[in-house]
Image: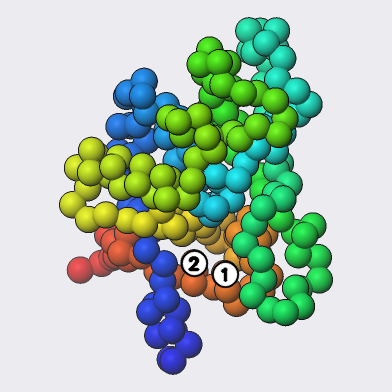
Amino acid sequence: MSYVRNILRLAPRALPAAAQRRLLEVTGEHVDGFRDHVILSVALGTALRESEIVALNIRDVVRGSVKASELKRGIEPIRSKVQLTTFKRSPHKQAPEGEESRQRVFLPRLVRARLAKFLGWKKRAREDLRPHAALFISRFGTRLSARQLRNMFRAWQERAGFEELYTFHSLRHTALTNLYAATKDLLLVQQQARHAHATTTEIYAHVSDEDVRRAVEDMPS
């Protein structure tokens, strides 16, 4: 019973489905929110941490170099799998074996489509598309910082009318919770989360209020 209590106590705080939809809707409705719309899509689709998102370069998500002719013809130059070079390191003095090679993240189809559209948007805005350039930049033309990312997320939550605010890290919890709900496969979630140990991933195997509601909806009474 203590094990069950610990799982329930450690259940991560994730955004409800309606809040996820609202967040993507409100950022997608505004031209000035397109960059942020793509960032939130990446976070919800990949479970990347804020530090990993702001560290992304063009070459991390693009196959080869960005070619204007391909963008015009609608050819998607986005990788299906990203090999991270910046990621959260193991806190142990000796990192688990294979930690570097384990930092691979798959990009969902919809995320790839939005990133491809984002490249065209960056080109029209005359942003740097060279391989080592930052994928997401601030309005000052510099790499977006983690602090700016957190402030952006808070501002869009307020704009979307959220009654309670979430941390940016909640998007990672939301992505992994969504993945477990869709697959019920902890090992698969562990791989996408890039956890060294399966026990770390077990917090996503919790029962939500929505799970209970669906389960009891048609109970004999």
Local crowd at mark 2 within 10 Å, few (<14), some, or many (≥20)?
Answer: many
Rendered residue at 23%/44% (across/down)? 158
- What residue is drawn where x is 62% and y is 62%? 88
How many marks overall? 2
Structural distance between the alpha carbons of marks 2 and 1: 6 Å
Circle 1 sits on which residue?
A: 201
Residue 195 falls left or right of residue 220: right
Q: Amino acid at mark 2?
A: Tyr
Q: Is residue 14 above or below residue 79?
A: below
Give the image location of residue 80, x and y in percent.
Answer: 70, 36
At x 48%, y 87%, the residue is 3
Q: Where residue 121 sits in the image (x, y, percent)?
A: 52, 18
> Marks 1 and 2: in contact by CB < 8 Å?
yes
Q: Amino acid at mark 1?
A: Thr
Q: Is residue 45 visible?
A: no
Q: Secondary structure at mark 1?
A: helix
The residue that mark 2 highlights is: 204
Q: Is residue 187 above or below residue 37?
A: below
* Residue 155 in the figure: left or right of residue 147: left
Using the image as rendered, state which of residue 54 and residue 171 is in the foreground. Answer: 54
Residue 50 visible, this orientation: yes
User: Is disc 2 placed on a helix, strand or loop?
Assistant: helix
